[in-house]
Amino acid sequence: MPDDIEGWAFADEADVEWIELGPGVAMKPLGGANGRMIALFRFDAGYAGATHEHVDAEFSYVLDGELVSNGVTMSAGHAYAAEAGTTHDEFRTDTGVTLVSVFAAPS
């Protein structure tokens, strides 16, 4: 990958390690700018997330596997956009799933 250019950051997914966030979920942070970040997420088969509020917009695209998000079954090629202030009250996968997400960077 090229060296960073002022205002830009580049990442090769193959060079970034998975960070275990908890049982059944891991993240690869790929970059961030202006308070937002892009990352890969891996959820193991059987994972079920807790209900949570989106304090900022979140955008996700399914790369492989299958998940159910707020009652909608999604597989590779599907995406969702969640507005700030919405509730995510169902997020689960029976098969395992990998997705790419853009969201507010943790402060």
Image (cartoon, rainbow, N blue to C red):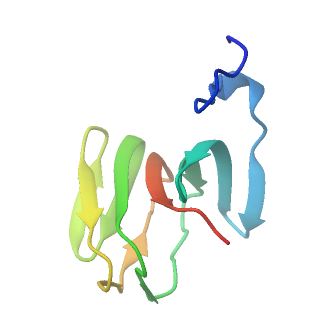
Q: Nearer the viewer, residue 86 or 44?
A: 86
Q: Is residue 32 left or right of residue 85?
A: right
Screen quadrant of the C terminus: bottom right
Q: Is residue 18 left or right of residue 66?
A: right
Q: Is residue 9 left or right of residue 77?
A: right
Vertical order, 66 against 5 (above or below):
below
Vertical order, 6 against 49 (above or below):
above
Residue 66 locus on image (x, y percent): 36, 52
Residue 70 locus on image (x, y percent): 27, 77
Residue 71 locus on image (x, y percent): 22, 75
Q: What number of labels is visible?
A: 0
Q: Is residue 69 left or right of residue 20?
A: left
Residue found at the far left of this picture: 72
Residue found at the far top of this picture: 2
Residue depicted at x 26% and y 58%: 80
Screen quadrant of the N terminus: top right
Residue depicted at x 64% and y 69%: 106
Vertical order, 55 against 36 (above or below):
below
- Which image quadrant is residue 25 in? bottom right
Residue depicted at x 64% and y 21%: 5
Residue depicted at x 65% and y 22%: 12
- Which image quadrant is residue 6 in? top right
Residue 44 locus on image (x, y percent): 60, 57
